[in-house]
Amino acid sequence: MSANPSAAFARELIASLHARGVEDFVLCPGSRSGPLAHALADAGSDNPPLGAPSVNLHVRIDERAAAFLALGLARGHEAAGACRPVAVITTSGTAVGNLLPAVMEAHHGGVPLLLLTADRPGELRGVGANQTTDQVGIFGTFVRWSADAAAPDEGESPGRAAELAARAVLIAMGDPARDDMTGTPGPVHLDLEFREPLGGDGGVWDSPPHVDATPSYGSRVITREDLPAALPAVERGVVIAGDRAGDVARQVAEAHGWPLLSEPTSGACAGDACIGAYLDLLEAPAGKDLTEQVHQVVVIGRPTLSRPIQRLIARAPALYVAAHGARWREAPRHADRVLRTVPPAWLTRADGRLELGDSAWLAQWRAAADALEVPEPTWGSAAVAAAFLDALTAEDLAVVGSSGPIRAIDRDRRMWAAGEAPTVIANRGLAGIDGTVSTAVGVALATRRPTHALMGDVTFLHDVGGLLVGPRERRPRVRIVVVNDGGGTIFSGLEHSQADPRNFERVFTTPHGADLAALCAGYGVSHTAVKSSEALSRALAKPPGGLEVVEARVR
């Protein structure tokens, strides 16, 4: 029996989480979280103690960056084909609040995170104790489940931490027995009370107790998903592949001979049905004529990038939605059918008549797209995106900021020119610019592969602290291409640009005047500045060897 119940509880929790597939733990320093820190220091060392699991420990000093690092690690595991939760550990107080932006993104994006926050024991709550606030339920509806775990006591039998770990992982990964948001992956919050002593005790790492993770939810609600049916066999259908749709969107389009309109983060930017220049086509007279002939729209994944796509969805005579991510229950209200996943019945045509090569409807879309004249971009954000894409192969990983860069890539034909696209990841759950640097670092660490990132200067500055990787931490291989155009120029294409130029610049464009080279030097990160497409292409010719920044100065 350990003389320190908090230390024993922490060891059981870490071991139980690892036994259920959690490999990565992102730890922020703090005293109240000391029991977890000591346990992770052992388990994350080069030579873990006898019986301890071997985990990947990542230490960061900024909780907001740490949470997005955890989110990036989870997205990286997903990209590698091994979906698993990632844990982030903080002390009490404001440290917990700093997790919220990443928690919101994980909630809407369907990313499994485990939030392990240390807290004061019950007797120190509400009495003015230092660094104590209302942490129970602090994340509200942005978590799939939360638990307030009482402080471990002397003489407590093993098993409570293992039960918490089992249920937390089950729900974070998405429990298929549920018909609500808990049925999709997402964040889970464990608020863990710890009494002093908070230090390590050198105790034994016992095998985690086996517990049944199945919650008692009662009978399952029957939904429309229980009765999947084939899609109506119309000739003039369109498949829209939104964020994280997956290759199944291509399969549906090809099975029916329908054009496939794929966003860069869909994972479906390939195949003979894919219309590479779909945005330019939808805005051209020929494309508008084609959209007026559409009889049916199938949406797979969650499209978020462009107004033309949203208009096509809004006026669809018939609309079928599947795999809408964590927000599948928030699909358009006029949808004829909404399914959590794509049913096998959608992969074949109901009447069996049409094959991909026989579709005159698809041929019209391809011919109209091929007839478009799209000029080569001059030096600017579009040209930077073009050079970025040219430097990538189908095997590459790219993390793209959720502002101007993702839209520039969405419009660029290079994304589909070779018939196969790189894996593109973006935080499209809420489409914020928060934590993009840290997300890219997490993707690289999880996949252990070179990772390429593209983002604007404001996005970069918003998470410049993500460049901080301590001397004892594993360094990622990430090249960040920053489009420095002097501020948030994405607003130039919105109605706000009609305001007084001085007001528009101050409150929307927000010029920063930051010296990116000096910032990178302060973090010990390699920096290269380029002022032309040719120079950028040369800078991108070699794979990234570490953490480096290429600043494309377009203004």
Image (cartoon, rainbow, N blue to C red):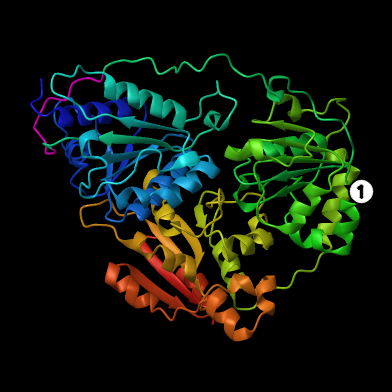
- The residue nearer to you, when weighing 492 against 250, is 492
> Is residue 76 among what the camera can see?
yes
Q: What range is drawn magenta here?
A: 198-208
Residue 534 x/y as whole percent: 54, 76
490 left or right of 69 in image: right
412 left or right of 326 in image: right
The residue sitting at 51% across, 25% down in the picture is 175
Q: Is residue 222 above or below residue 305?
A: above
Q: Is residue 521 above or below residue 231?
A: below
Residue 298 placement: quadrant:
top right
Element type at marker 1? loop
Label 1 sits on what residue type? Gln
413 left or right of 525 in image: right
The residue sitting at 75% across, 53% down in the picture is 309
Residue 333 placement: quadrant:
top right
Disc 1 crowd rating (10 Å Cα; few below 14, some 14-19, many 20+) is: few
Residue 398 x/y as whole percent: 51, 54
Q: Main secondary structure of the magenta part?
A: loop
The N terminus: image quadrant: top left
Q: Is residue 350 magenta?
A: no
257 left or right of 68 in image: right
The C terminus: image quadrant: bottom right
Disc 1 designates what residue? 293
Residue 47 x/y as whole percent: 15, 36
Total numbered circles: 1
Among all residues in the image, which is located at the extreme front?
Answer: 127
> Is residue 246 among what the camera can see?
no
Q: Is residue 456 above or below residue 62?
A: below
Residue 395 x/y as whole percent: 52, 48
